[in-house]
Image: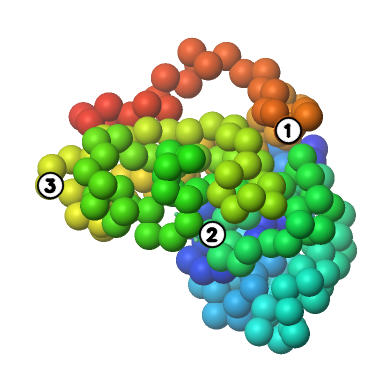
Amino acid sequence: MISLVILISGRGSNMAALLDAAGRGDLPVRIAGVVANRPDAAGLATAAAAGVPTCVVDHRAFAGRAEFDAALAEAIDACAPDLVVLAGFMRILGEAFVQRYAGRLLNIHPSLLPAFPGLHTHRRALAEGVRIHGCSVHFVTADLDHGPIVVQAAVPVLDSDDEETLAARVIAQEHRIYPLAVRWFAEGRLQLRQGRVVCAVEQAAHPWLIVPASAAG
Ligand code: GRF
């Protein structure tokens, strides 16, 4: 069983999806710790209630990014995780940090990358008039929101959508694909080799990764 550390900044619903999956026995992982960069991150209470050790490394307490990244790495390494999972972690991480966890650092992003890296993805998707939107799990590189893609889920954009309804449709899929990607990693079926994703998974086993309008909520 591998161990993982989850980094959060806020609500932590993706973290909760991972905790739930592990609690149900669907994920062969031990969640060794949850680290937040904000003391008011609501997910901290969720993690504590699930019995997971938490800590805060407040970015505002550090002179710069390098100092923050070093303190964050120290908090992570105290748990000696096999995998580090960013779940709504809203700080840009420097090159040295990303290198330190190369091949064992995952992120989830609420768009079909490489479309809409950065913030406000649902608003931008609606403004562009795309008919298909979604979410992506990717390995983290120093290039923000551009690392090698592990798995994506696509949802329709409906004429009636606003930012809120579209966000709700996407996050439901985030909660499916993140535990899936972590499970593949934990089972040794997912690797980063020479900057490319190698994933020993039958694609046909997961047809729901394209979610039809009738099932997309
Ligand atoms: C998610 O949409 C995630 O993809 C993005 O930030 C949001 C975090 O939500 N990076 P939560 O904290 O997991 O509820």
Q: Residue 39 location in percent, x, y?
A: 61, 80
Residue type at tag 2: Gly
Residue 72: name its quadrant: bottom right
Number of disc labels: 3
Query: Which of the labelled discs sits on residue 88, or is there none?
Result: 2
Q: Earlier in the sequence, mark 1 or mark 2?
A: 2
On the picture, is 160 further left or further right than 163?
left
Cα separation between marks 3 and 2: 27 Å
Residue 78: name its quadrant: bottom right
**Residue visible at 48% across and 57% down in the picture:** 118
Residue lying farthest left? 160
Residue type at tag 1: Gly
**Residue visible at 70% across and 28% down in the picture:** 196
Element type where label 2 sits in the image: loop
Number of other residues with Cα within 10 Å of mark 2, as a class: few under 14, some 14 to 19, many 20 or more: many
**Residue visible at 31% across and 53% down in the picture:** 124
- According to the picture, the residue beneath numbered tag 3 turns out to be 160
- According to the picture, the residue beneath numbered tag 1 turns out to be 195
Please state, as top left, top right, bottom left or bottom right, where the C terminus lies in the image.
top left
**Residue visible at 56% across and 40% down in the picture:** 137
Element type where label 3 sits in the image: loop
